[in-house]
Each structure stands twice: as C-alpha cells, then as structure tokens.
Image: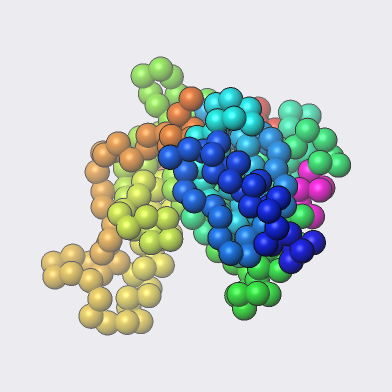
Amino acid sequence: MVDYLANTEINSQRIAAVESCFGASGQPLALPGRVLLGEGVLTKECRKKAKPRIFFLFNDILVYGSIVLSKRKYRSQHIIPLEEVTLEPLPETLQAKNRWMIKTAKKSFVVSAASTTERQEWISHIEECVRRQLLATGRQPSTEHAAPWIPDKATDICMRCTQTRFSALTRRHHCRKCGFVVCAECSRQRFLLPRLSPKPLRVCTLCYRELAAQKRQEEEEEPGVGSPGQPAYLAGAVCGASSGDDEDSDEDREGSGDGDWPSRVEFYSSGVSWSAFHS
C-alpha cells in the first residue's frame, strides 16, 4: 500500500492539502517516498485541560496541530519522526477511556480516541509504521523517554512537599524530569537535560538530588570534568528562582522533604484516579 501510493497524484494532492491547512506557519511535508496514510481528531491531554488536536499519520512521521477551522485551517504544527516513537496503551478509568501515551525522548503525552476500535486502529497503524521505519533506518527502538506532564487539575497540593496548596496566587510548576506538579520552593533548582534543551531546566528537589548524584558518580569515574571552584557534579546545574521557563507552550496556552508521595508514581499507567492526588 505504501509503495503503491508513494508517487501517485492523489497522495501528492492529499499532502498538499495538509500543507495548505497549516499555511505559512507549517513546515513543508512533501518528500519523495512520503505517504499520507490517515488522519483524524484525537483528544490530547494538555497541561490545563484536554483539547482536540488534528493528527496526520505518514509512513515516516506523525504530525499534529491545533484546530482553528476543521479541514480548513490548523496551527501549531508538530512533527514527530516515527523512529523515535514508542506507544503505551493506558488502563481504563471512570474519568478517562480509550487512552494511550505517545512517548519520545523529547516529549511524551497522552491522547484518547472516541472509541476502543478507533484507539486500536491508531495504535496498530502507528506501530506498523514505526516497525517499518526502524527496519528501513536500521535504528533500534528508543529506550529513553521524556516524562509526560501530569495535568494541573490532578492535584491541589505540591506533589513533593505535600504542604503547599495551589491557588490563584500560588502557581503550579512542572518538573521537567519526572513531570510532577510542584510548588516554586520545591522546584528552585535547574539541571541540564541535553535531550530536552540546551539550557538548564526546572527540576524538583528529588530529581535534582538524583541527577546531581548520578553526575557526581559519572565524573568521579572520569576525572578532570567540571569547572574550577565548583564541584564537578554541579556543572550544568543552576539554582534560583523561576526565570519564566515554566510558561505554557503555544499549543497548551488556550526543601529536602518529599512528603508522602512515592519517589516515582506511575500516574498514567497505574490507572490511579486524579482525586487520589488531592488532599
């Protein structure tokens, strides 16, 4: 099917139509051998709330964006190479059904379909395209993935200290390493996470300690790394108040104590209710 459609006029017209919907803000999508296999609307769990997003599955990439006018205008185009994608089906809960997680090294997020059948079709088609793409490129499946951000409404209190209560004046932040919702005091540190950004990013107290310990161990095994007058394990780590790196992205805009939370709560895969994270 893919090989048959690769150089056909109908495939070229379909890809051109997608490019037209994204307009000048989107990247060109037409490439030799690229085939548009399917499209549809999925609900993406964003930081503030779940929102509909248009998704396009090509034989080598997954493209999604915000819907301005259905089938006519989209914005905030995102392109994900399929060889970087891993899928994880999620358990059913009373609040959320037909969900799965799309995981990559740079970003992971949860989407849901309108029905179980639609979810299974999306998953099977994406996984088949990933398998073919890995075979074509000779790459191994990704083993490291970014943590998905836990939605703001999942908790009323900081998931690290469990003391700070969020309000209109006390804002939520997200740890870039574990995705937990945390207060400003529990996320004052910054650490360099090269897979995510060339600059140090906000991390929670627990992740900071773990990352610093890991870096210290690595640099003890490799002497001479670090900067004069600074412990080697702190190279690339920055402490301080928020520098505004916690603002929502365009697509989502529309102490030492760790309290009682486990160090790693599998929020999505455990099927735990959001209410379980409220005091």
Q: Residue furthest right?
A: 117
When asked about the image quadrant of residue 25, the answer is top left
When asked about the image quadrant of residue 119, the answer is top right
When asked about the image quadrant of residue 240, the answer is top left
Q: Residue furthest top?
A: 168
**Residue 155 seen by the camera:** no
Q: Nearer the viewer, residue 97 or 78?
A: 78
Residue 55 percent across, percent down from the top left: 64, 42
With 52 as the anchor, is 76 left or right in this view? Answer: left
Q: Residue furthest left?
A: 229
The correct choice, above or below, for 35 with respect to 13 in the image is: below
**Residue 119 seen by the camera:** yes
The image quadrant where one finds the N terminus is: bottom right
Which residues are drawn in magenta?
119-124
The correct choice, above or below, for 3 with respect to 261 in the image is: below
The correct choice, above or below, for 115 with respect to 9 in the image is: above
The image quadrant where one finds the C terminus is: top right
- In the rendered structure, does residue 163 fall within the stretch colored magenta? no
Residue at 30% in and 36% down = 244
- Tally of marks: 0
